Image (tube, rainbow, N blue to C red):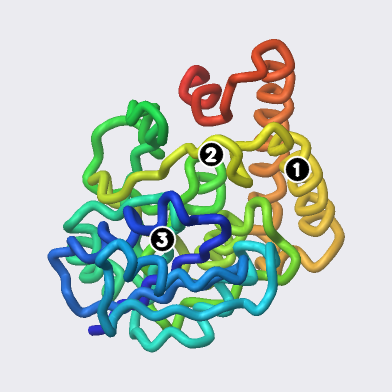
Amino acid sequence: MLVSIITPAYRAQATIARAVKSVLAQTYKDWEIVVVSDDGIDYVDLLAQHGIRGARIRGISTGRVGSGCHNARNAGLAVARGEAIAALDADDVFLPRRLETLLPVARRDGAATDNPVVIDDVSGAEFHRARAGSFTFVKLDVSALLALSVPLFPLVMREHAEPRLPGVELGEDFVANLRLIDRIGSLTMLGETLSEYHVVTGSLCHSDESAAGFEKSYTDLIERLSGGDRLGLSGRNAIAARDGLLQKRELNRAFARAKALDPDLDFQSFAASRR
């Protein structure tokens, strides 16, 4: 079964080789990776300069600059050939057994994710894992998903993989997962750590403006869930999502206050301190 891995790339020159090498190291070998340039750079050529090449590494472009991760993911999904779809950001890493471990569970349940560890990209220090404690697996509903402070990038069977909503950038990952849970009932999360989520200073989610950006994003999404299109969710899940996002917005506001006192603070460090 072919797995298509979609990697948006925007100013990703410093990290893209590491991300793709982590795919090359997978124990499961039936994959392709679609690197979607959103800045006009030919990343396949860049990877070749690092000695990374092969027919399974495909490159496309959004034809724009900075159109957003959600748009790049959709461009990649449109050309993906796999029967299962995975997402790998250009600054993150798959551990070698990720595809091998998740694919049987995804085939059974429609989708599956691991319990990623958060890594400081400069020091290599571990902050925390997405879900604390020891467990074999859990079934995440909408409320459980939104209680997490770390993005999840599940392996999704093609029939359940839908495009990202247009215009939703900050929070596009959890909005996609909310909609996925609404379609398949729950998201299976394994307790094993099979990926690394890297905190890169200056990236979209870890910039000095991220708290203000998320404040606006959360507020817009709450309004849509309260009286708009409900993000396409069923009534019960829309209510649960609204309640979860109200809590996320309060956490983000607490982070903004803390960052005003400590300008070097990043969100994942703050989230780890609140556990």
Image location (x, y in percent) of residue 219: 81, 45
Judging depth in this view, the residue of 66 and 198 nearest the camera is 66
Report crowding for label 2: few under 14, some 14 to 19, many 20 or more residues within 10 A (C-alpha).
some
Judging depth in this view, the residue of 247 and 235 nearest the camera is 247
- Mark 1 or mark 2: whose residue is earlier in sequence: 2
- Mark 3 or mark 1: whose residue is earlier in sequence: 3
Indicate the quadrant containing the N terminus: top left, top right, bottom left or bottom right. bottom left
Judging depth in this view, the residue of 54 and 115 nearest the camera is 54
* 15 lies above or below 187: above
Amino acid on which disc 1 is placed:
Gly
Image location (x, y in percent) of residue 82: 35, 84
Q: Residue 213: which numbered mark, if any? A: 1
- Mark 3 or mark 2: whose residue is earlier in sequence: 3
Q: Residue 147: which numbered mark, if any? A: 2
Judging depth in this view, the residue of 188 and 7 nearest the camera is 7
Q: Picture quarter containing residue 108?
A: bottom left
Which residue is drawn at the image coordinates 38% and 88% (left, top)?
Answer: 81
* 222 lies above or below 147: below
* 40 lies above or below 245: below
Amino acid on which disc 2 is placed:
Ala
Q: Residue 11: which numbered mark, if any? A: none
